[in-house]
Image (spheres, rainbow, N blue to C red):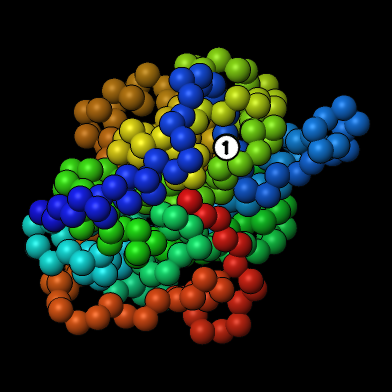
Amino acid sequence: MARGRPAASIGMMALLAAASWAPAERASAFAVLEPITAPCATCPGGVALDVESTLLAAPRWDAKPGAGGLADGLRVNIDHTIPLAFGVTDLVLIEKMYAAMAAGVRAWASPAVAFDITIGPGAGGDEISIWTGSSVGRGGHTEWHAAFSSDRTFTNGDVVPGQAITDALIVLNQESMTLLFRTLGESYCLAVLQRLVEHEIGHALGLGHPTDFPEFNIDQDDDPTNALVVDFDDPFAGLRVSELPDVTAVMVPWAHLSLQEAFKPALHLDDLGGRDVLYPVPEPAPLALLVAAALGAAALVALRPASHAPASTSAPPARPSASGASPKSSAPRPAANTTCV
C-alpha cells in the first residue's frame, strides 16, 4: 500500500491540480503532431490550420505489410524495474502496476491498431519502450522518431508519402510518480499511472495536446457529446477546425487538467476519434460481428506472459537521456521529437 505523508500529499495534489479546475463547458476536437498552417489575415496569429494538409502529412505508423509496426502489431515493452524506481517493493502492488500500464497501452487498441506487449528488460526489436527517469514533463514525455516513406500506407490501404513513425520512447517522470506512490492511496496511484501511460501512448500514435493550441484542433462539428463518424474510404471527410477542445480528454496534459480528471483513465470520444482518423477502421458487416462474437475474437491485443524478473533491491539500469537516445541501437540517430505531459 502507498504510505501517507500529509505535507507531501498536499504537494502531490497541487502537482496534479496544476493551474486551476477545468471549466464545465466541453466540446469535441483532437490534435495531431506537427500541424500545418496557412496564412490568414483575419485569424489570431495570422495563420489558420490547413486541415487536409495536416492530416495527410501527420506522422503515423505504417500499415504496409512487411514494414513492421501496424502490420504485425506494435511491439511494446514495459520496463520491469519501473515499480522499484517508484519506491514500490510490495509484490502484489507491483503486479497491479504492470497490469495498469498494460491496460494503458491496450486502451488504444482497435481492429486497425494492435499491440504485442511484453514486461521485462526490453529487446532490440521493441517499437515502443516505456521507461522511467528524469523527464522534461510533469508526468512524463515521449520521444519519437519518424522517417520519410514514399509508400507510407494508411490502414484503409491508401498510399500517401510522408513521415512514418519508426519508434517511440516513453519516459515516466520518476520524481513525480515516486511522490505519488508515497502519498496517495493505491487505487488513485494506479488510476493516475494508467492514464499517464494512455496519454503517452497517444503521443506515440501521433496525437498531440488539444489544449495547447485550440485553434489547431480538428472535428466534424462543435457538439460536446457526439462521436466522430469516420469514413473508412475517406477518413478526412467533413473534418474542419474546432476550437472547443474537451478539457477532460486523456490527451490533455497535466498542466491543463483538473484534479478530479487525473484519476479517470477512460479514453474519451475525442481521443478515440483522433485515433480512428489516423488509423481508420472499416465498419464490420453484421455477419462478421456474429462470427466474431461466436469465436470470442474480441481480444484484439495479445499480452504475452510476463517474463520479467522479480523485483530486486538493485538500482534500476541507467536511463536514456532526454536528448533522444533510443534503447534500440547505439548508432547515431536523428534528433528525437519530444512531447510532454
Q: Is residue 72 left or right of residue 313?
A: right
Q: Residue at x 64, y 33 (%)?
A: 214
Q: What element carries label 1?
A: loop
Residue 163 placement (x, y as % from top left): 67, 56
Residue 22 placement (x, y as % from top left): 46, 29
Tell me which amino acid carries mark 1: Pro
Height in image: 250 above or below 319?
above
Residue 83 sits in which quadrant?
A: bottom left
Residue 80 in view here: no
Height in image: 278 above or below 29?
below
Height in image: 286 above or below 11?
above
Q: Which residue is drawn at 81% across and 38% down?
A: 45
Crowd band around label 1 with a 10 angstrom C-alpha radius: few (<14), some (14–19), many (20+): many
Residue at the far right in the pictured view:
41
Residue 333 sits in which quadrant?
A: bottom right
Reading the image, the residue beneath label 1 is 210
In front of the other: 73 or 10: 10
